[in-house]
Amino acid sequence: MQKEIVRRSPVPYYLAGLCWLVYSLIFPFYRLTDMLVAAILSCAVFFLGGMVFKPSREIVEVEESFGATGNAQADEMIARGQGLLKDIREVNNRINHPELSAKISALEDTCRQMFGEVRRRPEKAAMIRRALDYYLPVVLKMLNSYDNMEGQAVQGGTVKTAMGKIEGVMDTVLQAFRNQLDSLYKDEALDISTDITVLQGMLTQEGLIDGEINPEKQGMGQRPT
C-alpha cells in the first residue's frame, strides 16, 4: 500500500533562529519594542524561507496492517499472506520493467482485498489456502528468477525467452487472483439476489409494482393536485 509523506525542510526554522541571534547582536535586546521587532522579522524570514525551501513529497510503500479476527486459521493465513506480499513488493522494487511492475502491483492490491475480505468473514479463510500454499510462493519464485536474470550483464536467447514467458504469464496470474477474489463474494452475491427476488415477489403480491413501482398504489408517491 502506498502512502504520501510530506517532509518539511528545517531551513526556515534555522533562518528564524538566526534572525533572532543576529538582531540580538546588533541591537539592545532588553526593550519590549526590540523583542517585538525581532519576532516580526523572524516570522517574516520563516515565511519567506518556507516559500523558498518548500516541503518535499515522497511516495513510500507501507505494510497494511490487518487486525486479529479471533479465528486462528484466518489470522495465520493473513499473516503468512502479508509476509509473501512483503517479499513480492521487495522484488518488484528491483524490477526494471514498468509494465510487469504495474501487473505485480495490481496483484498485490488484489491480494490485499482478499485478505481484507477474509478478515471481515474469517470463515472464508479456507478458500484462499491454495493461493497461499502454492500460487503466491510460485509467483515469488518466478519473480526472483526474473530479477536475477534481469541483473545479468549479458542476456542470451535462453534468458530472454524465460523472461518473456514470466512477463506473459503475469496476465494469467493476475486474472486468476481476480477470479479468486470474485469467488469470495459469491455467497454474499447469492444472498443479495435471493433477497431481491423475495422483495420483488412481495411487492408484486401486494400490488405495489407491476414491472415498475406503481405510484398510485397504497398512496405511495402521489402528486398533490
Image (cartoon, grey):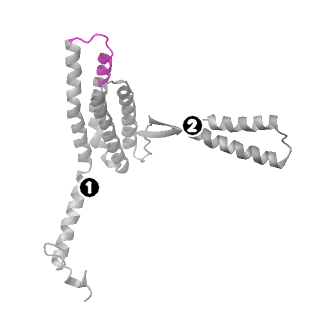
In terms of depth relative to the viewer, which is nearer, 105 or 142?
Answer: 105
State the SS at label 2.
helix
- Give the extent of the magenta segment: 143-156
Q: Amino acid under label 1?
A: Glu
Q: Which residue is mark 2?
A: 52
Is 22 on the left or on the right of 57, as rendered?
right
**Dot 1 alpha-carbon crowd within 10 angstroms: few under 14, some 14 to 19, many 20 or more:** few
Residue 76 visible to the viewer: yes
Residue 107 against residue 154 in the figure, above or below: below
**Foreground pick, 192 / 15:** 15
Residue drawn at x 30%, y 33% is 102
- The residue under label 1 is 188
Name above or below for residue 201 compared with residue 118.
below
Q: Where does residue 209 sit, x and y in percent of width and height?
A: 17, 76
Residue 27 sits in which quadrant?
A: top right
Which amino acid lies under the numbered mark 2 shown in the image of this protein?
Val
Residue 61 visible? The answer is no
Q: Count neighbours of disc 2 (C-alpha within 10 A) and say few if under 14, some if 14 to 19, many if 20 or more.
A: few
Q: Identify the residue shown where x is 61% and y is 41%.
A: 48
Q: Position of residue 76 (x, y in %)?
A: 39, 38
- Give me the residue at 27% from left, 27% from top: 138
